[in-house]
Image: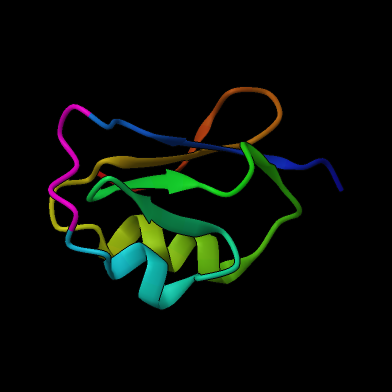
Amino acid sequence: MDDWGLEVDRRICVGAAVCAGVAPEHFRLENGVSTPVTTSVEPNNAVLDAAESCPVEAILVRESDGSVLAPQT
């Protein structure tokens, strides 16, 4: 199975830290804003939960082909 890509739009992140609480092995806060620990991860439901839980939808999870997995709109 191919890895997923992680992105955080730091321009809209409000630093709620929900992602770091839901998936601390994948997200951390830097200067009050979320950042992925790495931009490529093995498929993991915690990453999807973190993206879906973000109050401003600043997290994007993508398949290796570029299609968006989360957040679902």
* Magenta stretch: includes residue 72: no
Describe residue 28's horizontal placement relative to residue 55 as left or right: right
The residue depicted at 28 percent of the width and 69 percent of the height is: 18
Q: Main secondary structure of the magenta part?
A: loop
Q: Position of residue 37 (x, y in %)?
A: 58, 49
The residue depicted at 48 percent of the width and 57 percent of the height is: 27
Would residue 72 be seen by someone viewing this image from the given angle?
Answer: no
Q: Position of residue 1 (x, y in %)?
A: 87, 48
- Between 23 and 61, which is closer to the camera in this rendering? 23
Describe residue 55's horizontal placement relative to residue 28 as left or right: left
The image quadrant where one finds the C terminus is: top left
Q: Position of residue 11 (x, y in %)?
A: 18, 27
- Between 33 and 4, which is closer to the camera in this rendering? 33
Quadrant in the rendering for residue 3 = top right
- Between 35 and 22, which is closer to the camera in this rendering? 35
The residue depicted at 26 percent of the width and 41 percent of the height is: 58
- Between 33 and 56, which is closer to the camera in this rendering? 33
Which residue occupies the extreme right position in the image? 1
Instruction: Tell me if residue 3 comes above or below residue 12 in the rendering.
Output: below
User: The magenta stretch spans which residues?
Assistant: 11-15
Instruction: Tell me if residue 53 comes above or below residue 33 in the rendering.
Output: below
Would residue 65 be seen by someone viewing this image from the given angle?
Answer: yes
